[in-house]
Amino acid sequence: MILEWIIAARDSDDQDAFAELVYSFQDAVYNLCYRMLGERTEAEDAAQEAFI
C-alpha cells in the first residue's frame, strides 16, 4: 500500500526512499500549492516546506 510506503520513507533515514517520495509527489504537491497560493515562487516555497 502506498500510504505505508510513504510512512516508512518518512520515518527512515533512507535518502533514496526520500528522493523517490519527493520525485513521486512533487508535481502534485506543487500544483496544489499553486492553486491555493496563486504565485509560482510562493508555491515552490510551500511545496519545498511540505517535504521538510
Image (cartoon, helix red, strand yellow):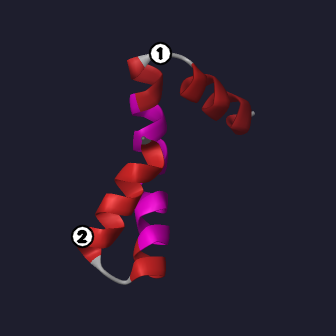
Q: Nearer the viewer, residue 51 or 24?
A: 51
Q: Nearer the viewer, residue 14 or 24?
A: 14
**Mark 2 = which residue?**
41
The Cα–Cα distance between marks 2 and 1, rounded to whole angstroms, is 29 Å
SS for callout 2: helix
Please, what is the dominant secondary structure of the magenta stretch?
helix
Quarter that holds the C terminus:
top left
Q: Number of marks in the image?
A: 2
Residue for point 63% across, 23% down: 8
**Relative to residue 19, is residue 22 depicted above or below?**
below
- Name which of mark 2 and mark 1 comes first in the sequence: 1
Residue for point 41% across, 79% down: 37
Q: Position of residue 9 (x, y in %)?
A: 56, 25
Give the side of residue 9 with respect to residue 37, left or right: right
SS for callout 1: loop
Any magenta on residue 47? Answer: no
Give the side of residue 15 with respect to residue 8, left or right: left
Any magenta on residue 30? Answer: yes
Q: Which mark is residue 22?
A: none
**Mark 1 = which residue?**
13
